Amino acid sequence: MSMMSIRAATPRDRDAIRLVEEHAFGQPVEAGLVDALVASGDVLAELVAEDDGAVVGHILFSRLFVEQDGDRFPAVALAPLAVEPSFHGTGIGGALVREAHIRLKDAGEKLSVVLGDPAYYGRFGYDRSRAALFESDYQGEALQALAWGDAPESGRLVYAPAFGGF
């Protein structure tokens, strides 16, 4: 039986992360976003899931700001989450989300935003109604938010510059 573990990503994981992202999404776009976020220093949490020593899952959270009335409130953006297709349905994605949330809350983060499947991310507390009042280039049914504390409910979402190229 294999043994899955979750740990912080390291520089030696870059090639394996790229492959997981490309396999999971069937294209290099998300892998390029990961590379750009890492290069720009906007990564707040990045974890990998390993199965018998091989990277089979990846999650990344980058800095996001909510701008409102001249103030900037720090938040995080979950993007991307990827699992090798042969491991879909095994709980690796959920384990990555839950572990990252623990680490982010422990670090004092108060708000997370994701653009993704509401049925999937809703299982972790993300809610469309929580994100409905934000101004965003990505506003729509897939934009969801999760608050762990006192966080703005409206304002303009400002993503890391790397998102502008994708």
Image: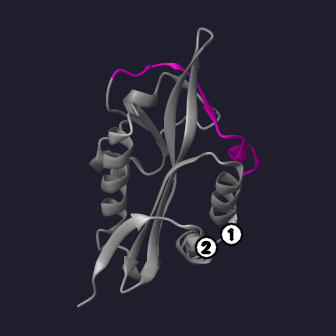
Q: Quadrant of the N terminus?
A: bottom left
Q: Amino acid at mark 2?
A: Glu
Query: What residue span does the magenta drawing correspond to?
Result: 150-166
Question: Residue 28 — which label?
Answer: 1
Task: Tell me, yes or no, whether the highlighted magenta stretch contains residue 160.
Answer: yes
On the question of residue 126 being in view, the answer is no
Q: Amino acid at mark 1?
A: Pro
Query: Dot 2: within a 10 Å radius of its alpha carbon, few (fewer than 14), some, or many (20 or more) residues?
Result: some
Residue 82, how many percent across, how many down?
A: 48, 66
Task: Tell me, yes or no, whether the highlighted magenta stretch contains residue 149.
Answer: no
Residue at horizontal 46 percent and vertical 78 percent from the top = 55
Looking at the image, residue 126 sits to the left or right of residue 29; the answer is: left
**Height in image: 51 above or below 8?**
below
- Asked whether 155 or 52 is in front, the reply is 52
**Height in image: 125 above or below 166?**
above
Q: How is the image coloured?
A: one colour
Looking at the image, residue 20 sits to the left or right of residue 103; the answer is: right
Numbered disc 2: secondary structure: helix
Which residue is labeled 2 in the image? 22
- Asked whether 103 or 75 is in front, the reply is 103
Numbered disc 1: secondary structure: loop
- Mark 1 and mark 2 in contact? Answer it, CB < 8 Å: yes
Q: Compare marks 1 and 2 and give the one earlier in the sequence.
A: 2
**Height in image: 147 above or below 91?**
above
Residue 32, how many percent across, how many down?
A: 70, 62
- Name, please, the residue furthest toward the bottom: 1
Residue 94, how many percent across, how many down?
A: 32, 60
Residue at horizontal 63 percent and vertical 61 percent from the top = 30
